[in-house]
Amino acid sequence: MRLLVTGAAGMLGRDVVAAAVDAGHEVAALARADLDITDADAVRAAVLAARPGAVINCAAWTDVDGAETAEEQATAVNGTGAGHLAAAATEAGALLVHVSSDYVFDGRSEEPYEEAAPTGPQGAYGRSKLAGEHAVAAAGGRSAIVRSAWVFGPHGKNFVDTMRRLGAERDEVAVVDDQVGCPTYTGHLAAALLRIAERGATGVMHLAGGGRCSWYDLAVATLEETGLACRVRPQSTADIGRPAPRQAFSVLSSTRADVPVLPNWRDGLRAHLTRVEVAA
Ligand SMILES: NC(=O)c1ccc[n+]([C@@H]2O[C@H](COP(=O)([O-])OP(=O)(O)OC[C@H]3O[C@@H](n4cnc5c(N)ncnc54)[C@H](OP(=O)(O)O)[C@@H]3O)[C@@H](O)[C@H]2O)c1
């Protein structure tokens, strides 16, 4: 099928484009320099020209802490920009596969968040992502709103690669052990987003790596898998003090039988490490 991918130079966007090309789809891969999704006219022109069967939106403001002092700019991309894409996709008769985030939840639950769980973002980034979900739904076309979490992959700044770097430089790193979530490898998420586009699945869906762990567990696993001798010291979220609030509990689960099930986060970690080690 013909696919249009926005944010095509981002960490997820690059793996989505690669997976789509590998699967034999015809892909219009638009990085920010090719298409700024805050420009409604440009979005409409690009989508109508490409005549895609589906648009996969990987474009976003992803600076969680920066959004606290730039909420308007974050919302222009994550909220209004997503709405422009949804309006254009609706006009073109295309499915919009829109990537959203665990940050739309408050993180206070003790049970995994299912698709119908009440939202309640705690910070500006989460509010901007929720605004995007609402804008996509309000456009009235066919859309899949896909929430993921704790994403890492070879094409962007991410926690796993930070741990690899610090683990090689230091004897000890301190990592929070009071936030729990589902680390998600871009290679697995990209393949699943493609399946959603191919099947034409619609509605809200949760797609994150299987299992759950804390950032501390993920750091320990990364150092184990890479054979680095660095020690990991647990610390609390309160000890670090970041500008944006972080959710203590960010585990996503799906009640939908038509949503692909992603491999366990540890398999995602190994797949990522194999790729970055081969590339090094
Ligand atoms: N990373 C995570 O842990 C995580 C977790 C859950 C959900 N998500 C979601 O996953 C999606 C992909 O994120 P990612 O991790 O791949 O982040 P990323 O590497 O920052 O990719 C986002 C891309 O969007 C581009 N972009 C920013 N503003 C744009 C605009 N106005 N028009 C067009 N493109 C624009 C960025 O370009 P520049 O780099 O040039 O600004 C970047 O290439 C996002 O929807 C994000 O909210 C991410």
Image (spheres, rainbow, N blue to C red):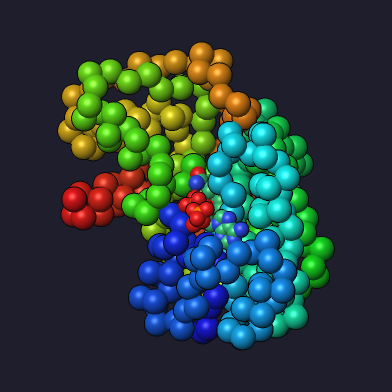
- The answer, for residue 122, to whether it is visible in the render is yes
Res. 207 in view: no
Q: Where does the image place residue 131, in percent across and percent down from the top left?
A: 75, 51
Percent position of residue 218, x then y: 38, 33
Point 40% across, 69% down: residue: 19
Seen at 68% across and 61% down, the residue is: 38
Q: Who's the residue at 79% across and 68% down the image? A: 139
Tell which of 130 and 33 is nearer to you: 33
Question: Of 73 and 85, which appears nearest the observer?
Answer: 73
Q: Quadrant of residue 46?
A: bottom right
In the picture provided, is 62 more to the left or to the right than 48? left
- Rendered image quadrant of residue 79: bottom right
Total numbered badges shown on the rendered structure: 0
Q: Would you identify the image quadrant in which residue 190 lies?
A: bottom left
Q: Is residue 15 above or below residue 266?
A: below
User: In the displayed structure, would residue 44 be above or below residue 85?
Assistant: below
In this rendering, position of residue 76 left or right of residue 257: right
Q: Position of residue 189 (x, y in %)?
A: 46, 57
- Residue in the foreground of this view, choosing between 38 and 215: 38
Query: Whole-percent x and y of residue 49?
Result: 61, 86
Left or right? Give the position of 23 relative to 50: left
